[in-house]
Amino acid sequence: MPEPAVEITGLTMRYGATVAVDDLSLRVERDSVTAVLGPNGAGKTTTLETCEGYRRPQAGVVRVLGLDPVRQRRELLPRIGVMLQAGGAWSGVRAAEMLAHVASLHAHPLDVGMLSDRLGLAECGRTPYRRLSGGQQQRLGLAMAVVGRPELVFVDEPTAGMDVGARHATWELLRELREAGVTVVLTTHYLEEAERLADRVHIIDHGRLIASGSPLELTRGGSHATIRLVVTEPFPPSAPESLRAALGAGIEVLPVDAYSLVISGPADATTLGKVSRWCEENGVLPESLNLGQRNLEDVFLELTGRPLETA
Amino acid sequence: MSTLTLTPAPGAAPLPRMVLAQARMESRLLLRNGEQLLIAIVIPVIVLIGTVVGADHLHQLRTERPIDVFAPGVLGLAVMSTSFTSLAIATGFERRYGVLKWLGSSPLPRSGLLLGKVGSLLMVEVLQLVVLGGVAAAMGWHPSLDPVAVLGAVAMLVLGTAAFASLGLFVAGALRAEATLAVANLVYLLLLAGGGVVLPTRWYGGFGHVAWLLPSGALGEGLRSALDGGGFPALATLVLVAWTALGTFLTARTFSWE
């Protein structure tokens, strides 16, 4: 069996009194797209930067392509591509010039013109970095990460701030990279990104791994389904409690915000009937009542008891 | 239409190619920046013309021709502007914008990055030397060009670059970008006025002895002496080596890449 692309064992990282990463262990198999999903401040970037050799593990072991990212840095770096969450280019450098420069640091770079075309960077090739839009800066960052034809790319929040079109173009390129045999590790706090792109998802919260699996494995919770109830007036504070009592055992009620909650359990006619009766008895006017399969958002909510901020 | 082949083919370019690419990139960015060009070329030219034209009012010159006194000092000023002020400001903003951080993940090693920076300084300095030397020659400068003089002048330019670059990196690596911008410009102005680089240190009275021990004073005096046929500037060499050692020590101890 080939060694994994990334193997993290018992990684712990602290900043002063704050524990950013707490005894984290995870593996990334080769030729996969792996998403590290979690809210802002969950420890995603710290984990990634430890893999990239920027930070020395305070406890635990990190191996990337079988190498120690700190001690075997020079051997590792040419084989990986890195996209930082922000920045990385001179403010006065033109987009095409930056990409050509990065290409010149590699032995067998991609064709810069074709890569620019692919990522929609051709039309802003002569624009200085500081005048690129946020989405263009992100795409240039991605191009800089892949132009050296790495075996493994780490992309930190690759589509943050992108419009829908650019986001889909980016996903398409990341999928093609995987098809071509490149391992992709991305952090994201977009559920849709993890769900649609990733072969495997690691959910991190407060620096700890709380779930791992394919999007399908994570969302398939047995016979469970979800009912999402959205109302027009804020729920009374006691609503989750009283609804839970009305529904009986085996059914979970999770408040999302003042106007919506998620009911997780066997979503059959009986449950639906009980929900509508509860609404009637409590004078609650439903705006929508959606029945559906669990998605990663529901999984996160169930695991942590709070919704994943998708802002 | 040919398609993009994304299959992995990793590998670093040969080190000399990476260093040359980095040096060319950095010098291009430096010369593109208006403020940097101002202190690299425009201010030294103005200082050269201003001091020579205004020399009649200085009442300090004895028998020397003004151009022979001021031209070497202005070359020293040009070295100072590029290797200290421009380098510090550029590096400060490279830290700010994550350029150094990103390059830290690229195949270019830290040593290659430093070599690239040195290369870019030398490229810009050659340009400055050509422009300022040309203006000075047009104003009638006739420096001594015997081998000892040339060797001495080259030693001064190289050691001056090393001393100021190590100090510039110290400032850029320890302070925030805005503070670096302020300090690098302020130090430049103070040394221009009182550092003995353009104006000979003997004009400063008692402070002249102190100015001689500054990197600016040693560089200015060393260049004036060498290009005036005064032999190899040994004392200035010692002073500049000492400043380089201090700057390198401070930079190595304090520099943070982010």
Image (tube, coloured by chain):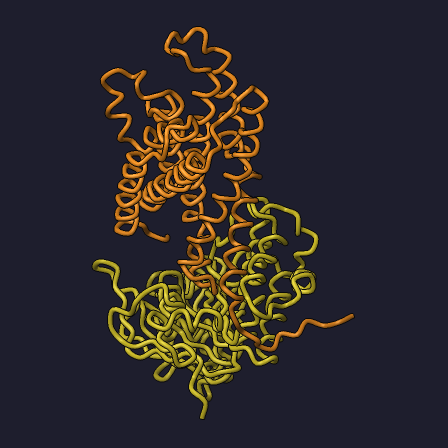
Residue at far front of view: B146
Quarter of the image for residue A187 reads bottom left
Quick check: A205 above or below A129? below
Point out residue B49 in the picture as x, y percentages from the top left corner. Answer: 52, 18
Residue at 24% in and 24% down: B209
Colour used to depict chain A in the structure image: yellow
Q: Is residue B5 above or below residue B35?
A: below
Which residue is nearer to you in this view: B36 or B66? B66
Q: Quadrant of residue A176?
A: bottom right
Percent across and percent down for residue A95 are: 61, 52
Depicted A157 relative to depicted B83: above or below? below
The residue most toward the bottom is A1
Who's the residue at 26% across and 41% down the image?
Answer: B242
The reply, left or right, for residue B100 in relation to residue A287 is left
Nearer to the camera, A197 or B127: B127
Residue extending farthest to the right is: B1
In front of the other: A79 or A63: A79
Number of marks drawn: 0
From the viewer's perspective, is residue B195 above or below residue A151? above
Residue A42, can we see it? no
Of A21 and B144, nearer the camera is B144
Residue B42, image x, y percentages: 53, 27
Image location of residue B250, percent across then percent down: 26, 46
Q: In which quarter of the image is residue B181?
A: top left
Image quarter where the N terminus of chain A lies is: bottom left
Q: In this view, does B22 lie to the left or right of A237?
A: right
Q: Residue at x 58, y 28 (%)?
A: B134
Q: Is residue A224 left or right of residue B13?
A: left
Q: Which chain is orange?
A: B
